[in-house]
Image (cartoon, rainbow, N blue to C red):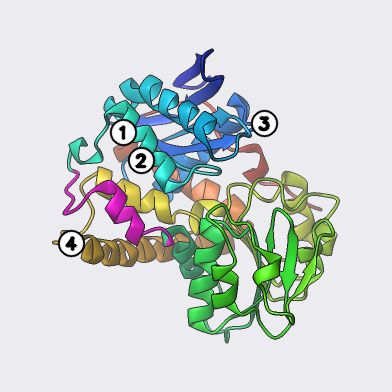
Amino acid sequence: MLLIKTTITDEKTGLLAHVAVDSLVDGRAMGGVRMTPGVTVEELATLARLMTLKLALAELPLGGAKAGIVSDLRPGPERDAQLREFGVSAAPLLKGGIYLGSDQGITHPDRTMIFDAAGYDVTGAPGARLPCSWAELWQKCQDITGFGVVRAIEAAEYGRAPSTAVIQGFGTVGRGAARHLAALGYRIVAVADAQGTVAHPGGLPLDALFAATDTTGLIDRSALPPAVRTSDAPEAWLDVPAEILVLAAGGAAIRRENADRVRARLVVEGANMPCTDAALETLQLRKIPVLPGIVANAGAAAATALVLTGHAPQAESAETLARGLREEVGRRILAAYRAVAERAAADDLTLPQAAVRHALRRVYSPRAAASTAINPITVPPSRARTDIH
């Protein structure tokens, strides 16, 4: 049973939303708001637990939460009305220590709209010190989750030369990962969005690709150079040879029925739970390591938690604060990866299994437990250890 579970409805706007709080540390928690047509309380409960574990791995004193707005509305007045109503209704939670930010389907401007409707100002959080507005800071930090994904890849690939990558999902996280991978010398040979896959074996022209992509992550094929191949075949990104596969779209991208098609040497969870239980088992049998999301995609969560808890570096401008947050997020992700990799080696576990075990030990350590209230779920089902004989 969740510590806090609430449903928000509004007949006028058609709003239906849920909020799930998995744990509280000193009465506070944080997590994103997603906006999808099929989001459920059960899904949010699992995601809130993953946030608890993610923050524990990053050694940040906040509990895990998640919210979901049940909607498939496209940008426009009807969608804006639902976002504002959600903000009004969620105001007591926001002002009471439950921070609800951006997640799948919710952009940073959407988050600003929710906060404005709630009358909520992040700078009012205990310990938060900002030289700028929250919106201005996030204009400088939009790619921080993608940045963190690449820091995790750097740690896992230590000693290897940059190679090739496929990115499934080209929203904020996917674009950030592409930009930072390219800066390290990786060739991005394929990218997938909701309409299919674009590919080039010699490496996609990223400047043209970014220019052709809208804020939701959809790529305008007509704006791409002729040499770029396009396909609307389902999951064509799985058929493009590459060393690294970054999953940055949504849940259950890799499942039992398609796990055998994975061609990468390393799978990276840039989204929340993009590999199902069965997929993790198959990849384990095939000896393909998976970088778990609670390590790799912690960038935005860690940056937000650093600010909310007063652990962000002191800065005099949005630019210097964003730079300092990247450095600190990168350091924490690297430390988390090393701790998880050591536990995996010591206990004969996969990286996802070791990440959960290590995080739970931190959550339930005597020091942390003194200020933490947590629901009785012990392990997300897809991250539990599976002994394969």
**Which residue appears at 60% of the width and 51% of the height?**
353
Q: Percent position (x, y) of residue 160?
A: 57, 84
Residue located beneath label 3 in the image: 38
Label 4 or label 2, whichever comes before in sequence order: 2
Quickly name the residue at label 2: 112
Tag 1: Cα neighbours inside 10 Å, few (<14), some, or many (≥20)?
some
Q: Which three-letter amino acid code belongs to the residue tagged 2?
A: Thr
Q: Going from the N terminus, do you reach mark 2 or mark 3 first?
A: 3
Q: Position of residue 52 (x, y in %)?
A: 44, 39
Q: To which residue does mark 1 refer? A: 116
Q: Residues within 10 Å of mark 3 (few under 14, many from 20)?
A: few
Badge 4 amino acid = Ser
What amino acid is at disc 1? Answer: Asp
Q: Which residues are magenta?
A: 128-143
Q: CA distance from mark 4 to mark 1?
A: 22 Å
Give the amino acid at mark 3.
Gly
Q: Does 139 lie within the magenta span? A: yes
**Disc number at residue 317?**
4
Disc 2 crowd rating (10 Å Cα; few below 14, some 14-19, many 20+) is many
Q: Is residue 362 visible?
A: yes
Q: Residues within 10 Å of mark 4 (few under 14, many from 20)?
A: some
The first of marks 4 and 3 along the sequence is 3
Q: How many marks?
A: 4
Q: Quadrant of residue 374?
A: top left
From this viewpoint, is residue 364 visible? no
> Could you tell me how far apart the alpha carbons at marks 2 and 1 are, in whole angstroms?
6 Å
Contact (Cβ within 8 Å) of mark 2 with mark 1: yes
Secondary structure type for disc 2: helix
Instruction: Determine the secondary structure under disc 1.
Output: helix
Dot 3: element: loop
